[in-house]
Image: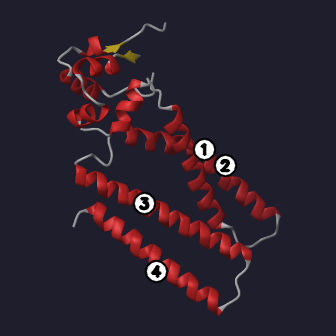
């Protein structure tokens, strides 16, 4: 799974700290998400998508690995 | 008083008390190198713990959550991965104690070993990230 957090964050002019505060997590969590080193819970994915006013499937890209 | 503040103060008081005790002990009896090594290790652990608590306290003041889903997942992953190695360590220690003819099982070595194994896995995941694909 990959995501467009970095791209969308730049689009909306948000810093990692801003996004972290908006979804109530630590900044390092956003860092790890952007580096694809961590897959968020459904709740966090939903909250992040809400910040960008988009659907989860538009922010988080699920690739078929089968 | 919040829990984080209480933990921080406990760590600070513990470190100071430990340092004073060690100073008084070192001036009253002759200590060996191994004692200094253990005391240094304990002191370092206490200092690192105090620093961690200080960071949590600072974050709490800023409204940053001390733990979130990633930090909890990191702790869980480190614990899960370190368990079999810690288990193996205890088996090795017990076998070593049995065959070396010692009547005393070095519990301290086991506890420090477990802590080191956990810390290594924590650092590994902190660097490599967590994959739950």
The residue that label 1 is drawn on is B84
Q: Residue furthest bottom?
A: B28
User: In the figure, is residue B14 to the left or right of B128?
Assistant: left
Which chain does the residue under circle 2 lie in?
B
Q: Which mark is residue B17?
A: 4
Q: CA distance from mark 2 to mark 4?
A: 35 Å
Residue at x-position 73% and y-position 75%: B33
Q: In the displayed structure, would residue B69 be above or below residue B40?
A: above
Tags 1 and 2 both on a single chain: yes
Residue at x-position 55% and y-position 65%: B44
Q: CA distance from mark 1 to mark 4?
A: 35 Å
The residue that label 3 is drawn on is B51
Closer to us: mark 3 or mark 4?
Answer: 3
Lower position in the chain sequence, tag 2 or tag 4: 4
Mark 4 burial class by Cα count in 10 Å: few <14, some 14-19, many 20+: few
Q: Position of residue B17 (x, y in %)?
A: 46, 80
**Is there a contact, CB below 8 Å, between mark 1 and mark 2?**
yes
Residue at x-position 20% and y-position 33%: A22
Which chain does the residue under circle 4 lie in?
B
Closer to us: mark 3 or mark 2?
Answer: 3
Tags 1 and 3 both on a single chain: yes
Q: CA distance from mark 1 to mark 2?
A: 6 Å
């Amino acid at each position: 799974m990959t995501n467009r957090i970095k791209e969308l964050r730049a689009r909306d002019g948000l810093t990692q700290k801003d996004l972290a505060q908006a979804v109530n997590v630590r900044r390092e969590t956003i860092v790890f998400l952007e580096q694809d080193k961590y897959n968020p819970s459904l709740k966090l994915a939903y909250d992040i998508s809400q910040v960008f006013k988009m659907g989860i499937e538009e922010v988080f890209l699920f690739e078929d690995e089968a | 008083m919040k829990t984080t503040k209480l933990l921080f103060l406990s760590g600070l008081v513990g470190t100071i008390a430990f340092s004073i005790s060690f100073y008084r002990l070192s001036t009253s009896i002759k200590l060996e190198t191994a004692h200094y090594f253990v005391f240094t290790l304990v002191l370092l652990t206490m200092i690192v713990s105090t620093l961690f608590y200080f960071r949590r306290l600072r974050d709490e003041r800023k409204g940053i959550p001390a733990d979130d889903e990633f930090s909890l997942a990191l702790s869980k992953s480190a614990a899960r991965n370190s368990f079999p190695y810690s288990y193996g360590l205890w088996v090795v220690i017990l076998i070593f104690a049995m065959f070396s003819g010692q009547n005393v099982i070095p519990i301290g070595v086991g506890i420090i070993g477990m802590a080191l194994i956990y810390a290594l896995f924590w650092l590994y995941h902190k660097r490599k990230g967590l994959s739950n694909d």
